[in-house]
Amino acid sequence: MINQLSILLKKEKASSNVIYFSMNERKIKNSFFRIGIILFSLVTISMVFMIVGTLLYKGYHQINWAFFTQVAPDTFTAMMAKSSGQSIPGGIVNGITGSVYLVLIASLIAIPLGVLIGVFLYENGKKRYAGIIRDIVDILQGVPSIVIGLIVYIWVVVPITKGYSVFAGSVALAIMMLPLIIRSTEESLKMVPETLKEAAIALGTPYYKVILKVLIPSSITGLTTGILLAVSRVLGETAPLMLTTLGNPAINWNVSKPVSAVPLLIWQFYNDPNMVDLIWSSTLFLMAFVLVLNLLSKWIAARQKR
Amino acid sequence: MKTNDINNNITPSILSIENLSIGYGEDKLAVKDVTTRFKKNAITAIMGPSGCGKTTLLRAINRMHELYPNIVCKGKIKLFDDDIYEMSTIDLRKEVGMVFQRPNPFPTMSIYENVIAGYKLNGIKLKRSERDEIVETSLKNVTLWDEVKNSLHKKGNFLSGGQQQRLCIARTLAFKPKVILLDEPTSALDPIATSKIEDLLVDLKKDYTIIMVTHNMSQAARISDNAMFMYLGELIEYNSTKVMFTNPGDPRTEAYLTGKFG
């Protein structure tokens, strides 16, 4: 033992020159690489801070009580206010209620369907047709949102609601939510240990109850995370809504009538030189909403790990 | 063949297996033509090296293998005089409970709910007083009552591994089964928790028939009444534990017990 050690030490001494040299070179490479990593990370992070900062700076002065309680003003009122140096009156409550309403109905369609398909894929994971379905779901995720808007226009707006409607918009959003919910359901079910399933089976539990009362409750955090991410994704969608719900200057709760949404209002404000100030506050609101949903889903996911 | 020497002496028998073969696919047999009986109100230990089919045999007794459709199973298993393959799985699993290698209480349920999970999951309605009684007696049976009686409605994740395993045994006892199958119930536990479970099993055998797979030979020697030795899917030797450990009939049993392989 001691003999071996001394041999090792001798070797170390003999080659210490070489080691010293290569260590130096390695240190340089290492620090070069580290600086690169820090630099690029900072660039990425600064994007987010720049976006939030710009929105806050440009949008904060329009955020007030009326912003959340009144509908969007017409262009003439906005022009009058601007010319007399006041901030634009009115708010985006028609957009907020519209967005919430659209996402709510889209969730009612997409969550049950997505969870069911996710359970199906989990159950039949290794079979060939499950693989095909999984590929199709992936393709669906990659379909451009404007294409989904067009398809829903032909499928729902023209034949069913005979005009732009909440329902058509919700269907478009639901189609966009589906792939995310399906995959997150499948993935979070896979995380449930097999032993738990066996425990339930060993108690004589019928299979559908194993899924409903053991597997789904055990993976509920993963499921909610997936659903929240899907919601926050479609909350910002504009293109499909332009082709399906169009927009509405008033609050609307009728599913067969058009409705507004926050991203639609932003687009509308952008096209109206008198309303420019409202763009920033609406965008700030949308960004904050999505950010909160994202943080919420991260928090839920972190709680599960604990 | 010495296999069946003891089978004639097993009275009263509660569970009998006839020509049971189980395979993963047609040609890969994990259990080969096993015929045997299990004694009532006794602990029977099934021993053998890894891959000898002991767990497969155990899981066949409450038809857990049906979870995996590629497993083929031939032969008969009778509980008293009923063929278990003609019983409904819920009736069978009420009579034959199972405890697994790793403690697996349901993480979403409280301790109380875990004990009556069998009733809940099968949609069996019970009065509140009946439920309370089942929970209390089951937990008392596994000597867990005093440790958890003040936190019955909390989730069980603060329990130690040994306590969780006893909770799983309580969950099985709640159905008042005739037979309890244990698949290496202490292999994931520390020595103190293990000895608690062993004492508990010895205590339970007056009311239940216990069949236990174990890797731990000294555990089998300590608590079992009868012992089975399996090798490569065959039942090599089956005898009272005392005879098996002092005077094994088959050279392979002797080799295993003396640690020559396994």
Image (cartoon, coloured by chain):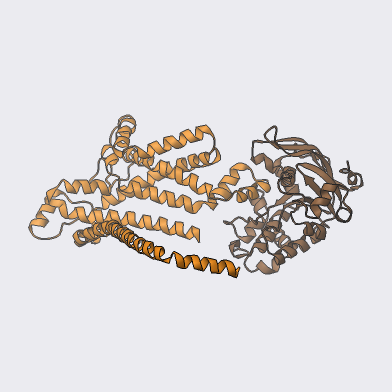
Q: Residue at x 78, y 56 (%)?
A: B217
Which hue belongs to chain A? Answer: orange
Location of residue B223 in the rendering, given as x and y in whole percent from the top left corner: 81, 59
Residue found at the very far left of the displayed protein: A83
Q: Is residue A66 visible?
A: no
Q: Residue at x 65, y 50 (%)?
A: A199
Q: Nearer the viewer, residue A189 or A172?
A: A189
Location of residue B249 in the rendering, given as x and y in whole percent from the top left corner: 88, 48
Location of residue B245 in the rendering, given as x and y in whole percent from the top left corner: 85, 55
Location of residue A209 in the rendering, given as x and y in whole percent from the top left corner: 60, 45
Image quadrant holding the N terminus of chain A, namely: bottom right
Q: Determine whether, in the image, residue A76 is placed left or right of residue B66.
A: left
Quarter of the rendering containing residue A247 = top left
> Is A2 rendered above or below residue B138?
below
Q: Nearer the viewer, residue A94 or B104?
A: B104
Q: Determine whether, in the image, residue B79 is placed left or right of residue B172.
A: right
Q: Nearer the viewer, residue B110 or A69?
A: B110
Residue found at the very far right of the displayed protein: B9
Which hue belongs to chain B? Answer: brown
Q: Determine whether, in the image, residue B35 is placed left or right of residue A295.
A: right
Q: How many marks?
A: 0
Q: Nearer the viewer, residue A48 or A100?
A: A48
Q: Is residue B33 visible?
A: yes
Q: Determine whether, in the image, residue B228 is placed left or right of residue B153.
A: right
> Is A242 rendered above or below residue B142?
above
